Amino acid sequence: NTIATGIRKGASHKIPLQAYAAQISERSTKMNECLRRIRTSLARFSQFARPETSPELSPVNLKVEVDKFLELMREGQKLDHITVHNEVPEGVFVIASRGTLQEILFNLFNNAWEAMRSQGELFLSSQANGRFVELRMRDTGPGIPGEILPYVFESYFSTKSDSESAGIGLPIVKHHVESLGGTVKVSDTEPGKGAEFLVKFRKAEAPLEVKR
């Protein structure tokens, strides 16, 4: 036990016990704060990203869900060394379920986070295009070589030996996006200039309670 060891060392060097009591109190406060953050993060994750066997589709506010997702990543300290440029506009609605949308965002983000080795810049933008809404996510990682672009959505395919997703993150994105009636593709990238994913969701009209 680190604290107990510290107390014994302090006693042997005649360091005031009061100083160690203050350290214990400070560490306890920090531990409680960490536990609070973990509980909050788990609660949010279970709310927004729980698996849905038969998701109920409805108009979903894209910016609201992107903002919630980014806040979750901040609480999980995933954005400590990443600068986010969130240009998703207000008032854009897509046909989706919140849980499925959050899982799409998480797997796209996790792919970018691993590619950038947890530090860099992340760009998010969105615009309506006919019957669809386009969501773009671009990172500043090493990019994806052209010769492997056709394989990135294949199950268990990965160029990262230490990947947490084990090559299933992007296939999950493709599966969910297509189940919502949309498409996903990755742009051609030059080595060292990052990767950009383009997701097309079916556009939805704003719910009546939002229009009023």
Image: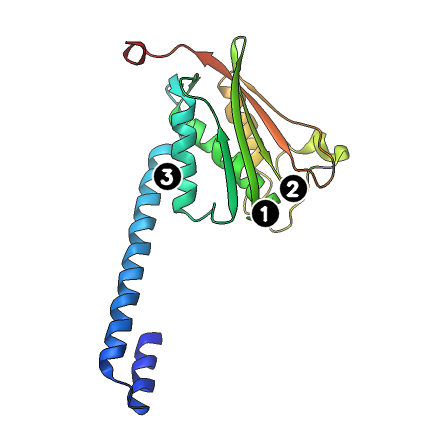
Q: Position of residue 36 (x, y in %)?
A: 29, 51
Q: Position of residue 27 (x, y in %)?
A: 30, 66
- The quadrant of the rendering that contains the C terminus is top left
CB of mark 3 within 8 Å of CB of mark 2?
no
Position of residue 17 relative to residue 66, above or below, is below
Position of residue 177 relative to residue 103, above or below, is above
Decide which of 3, 1 is in the foreground and name it: 3
Instruction: Give the SS element for disc 3.
Output: helix
Disc 3 versus disc 1: distance between alpha carbons?
20 Å
Provide the residue designation for mark 1.
163
Other-residue count near label 3 (Cα within 10 Å), few / some / many at <14 / 14–19 / ≥20: some
Residue 1 appears in the picture as rendered: no
Provide the residue designation for mark 3.
45
Provide the residue designation for mark 2.
158
Instruction: Give the SS element for disc 1.
Output: loop
Instruction: Give the SS element for disc 2.
Output: loop
Question: Amino acid type of disc 1?
Answer: Ser
Question: Amino acid type of disc 3?
Answer: Phe
Residue at (54, 8) in percent of width and height: 130
Q: Position of residue 121 (x, y in %)?
A: 56, 40
Quarter holding residue 90: top left
CB of mark 1 within 8 Å of CB of mark 2?
yes
